[in-house]
Amino acid sequence: MARRYCIIGAGYTGLAVAKAYTDLGLDYDHIEATAAIGGNWSHGVYDSTYLISSKGVTEYPDHPMPDDYPDFPSAAQMRDYLRGFAAEFGLDHRIEFDTLVTDVAPLDDAGLAGWRVEFADGAVREYDGVVVANGHYWDVNIPAYPGEFTGKQIHSKDYKRPADLDGSRVLVVGAGNSGCDLAVEAAVTFGNADISLRRSYWFIPKYVLGIPSGNFDVGSVPVPRLVQEAIFRSLVTIGMGRYESFGLTKPEHRIFDQDLVVNQQLPYFLKHGRITVRPEIARFDGRTVHFTDGTSGTYDTIVWATGFKTTFPFLRDGLLEWQNGQPRLVSHTFAPGVANLYFAGLVAPRSGAGMLLMNSSRLLAEAALLQQRLRTPVGDLYARISEPSAEILAGGPELRWEVVRGRWLVRALAQLLTARALLPGSAWRDRESPFGASAPGRRLLRPIRTAARLIA
């Protein structure tokens, strides 16, 4: 019987998964809730958005960005690029647009028998596996404060252009990459703006010595965390100097414990007095906002650049283990105890993700093929060498090594399963291990031997 998979989401990540599945000959239905390719790049960014990672580390390795693209392409150029990628490899003709998934449920306790997928129009289909690639930048997070603000409120996801702001007095809440961009845009449009910071941030310049700063995080070999931190703290020193000179408080957390902000314009506008830093909001009183330091300001519009919640409304309760608002996954991909349900793109790398996305999608496709031959979830075998985690922040070298290690494991498992099927009795156990007798080799061999006993 032909096997078929369901890929949910046709954005930056979902297209990479579709390409990997196509390359390995896996049949699939590609589902997209909106009417366009691109995911968040299609419906979730403002007109003036530019990439914060350079094109060289953002592009897919088998589809380079055009030579005439700048180092940091615009949102419109990114949308054109994604459409071009889909067209070149024939992925666009397989996407079902305006199709909303409402329920995803396993056909047995662990999903080994496949998955049932229900759609908003009432249609139901059964698949061997499901790939969740619908992104985590869509369910907006807006904090609550005492009182009522009677001006306009808008989340950064819904903001497109300055015409979306009522009046000239603008308060941006949150100083992530979007918050900094929007505070600068408001200051350019109206002459000044305020930005409210609940905590301090590490600000990374886009360029260091003429090199895009994200390129310093693209090595192929894992680098000790302390060395990485020293490199990025040096980038901050070069780009910022003393925080106090900008009216900012130097962050107390370690540089990789929170999202980094790649922005050079906010410090520039702070120095020119066109953006004023405010502390966290204490309460609202009409159009007056009171802050925790006792000061206040009157505003026409509040822009909430306060991030997103990770949610999967189509997944039933109990399928995932949650910690601090994130699901615990093995290698950001596999849910413990569940087979044939894969997560793609649920990670926030510090640098561009083009090569990483393509290789991790190939890992996912190879794992789907291997799962067809097992009676236990691939992720549970992988968990023998990689503990489940709810952490989505990660550096480029660590992620690339994690993917390489995963592909080695999956391929070794597949080869050993083939050998086990061909060799009589326990002869396979007598063959010399390709992993040697080292401790890392023994750790890698344990899930392989387990898998060899679980041939379907």
Image (cartoon, rainbow, N blue to C red):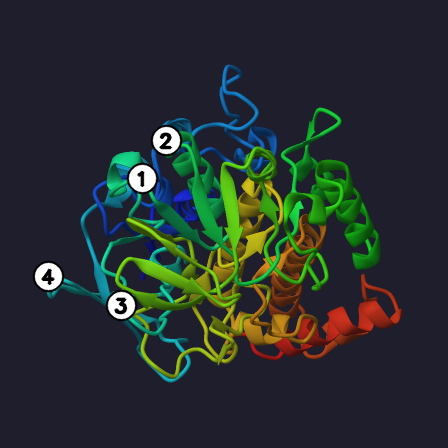
Q: Mark 3 points at which residue?
A: 148
Q: Name the residue under label 2.
A: 189
* Dot 1 alpha-carbon crowd within 10 angstroms: few under 14, some 14 to 19, many 20 or more: some
Which callout, 4 or 3, points at the residue further toward the start of the chain? 4
User: What element does badge 3 sit on?
Assistant: loop
Please tell me which residue lies in front, 307 or 129: 307
At x 49% / y 66%, what residue is drawn?
A: 294
In the picture, the quarter occupied by the N terminus is: bottom left
Residues under labels 4 and 3: Cα distance?
Answer: 39 Å
Cβ–Cβ below 8 Å for labels 2 and 4?
no
Which callout, 1 or 3, points at the residue further toward the start of the chain? 3
Residues under labels 1 and 2: Cα distance?
Answer: 8 Å
Quarter of the image holding residue 239?
A: top right
Residues under labels 3 and 2: Cα distance?
Answer: 26 Å
* Dot 4 alpha-carbon crowd within 10 angstroms: few under 14, some 14 to 19, many 20 or more: few
Q: Note whether residue 224 is visible.
A: yes
Cβ–Cβ below 8 Å for labels 3 and 2?
no
The disc label shown at residue 168, or none: 1
Which callout, 3 or 2, points at the residue further toward the start of the chain? 3
Which callout, 1 or 2, points at the residue further toward the start of the chain? 1
User: What element does badge 2 sit on?
Assistant: helix
Which callout, 1 or 4, points at the residue further toward the start of the chain? 4
Q: Where is residue 151 in the image (x, y as percent from the top left)?
A: 24, 54
User: What element does badge 4 sit on?
Assistant: loop
Residues under labels 1 and 4: Cα distance?
Answer: 44 Å
Q: Where is residue 158 in the image (x, y as percent from the top left)?
A: 29, 48
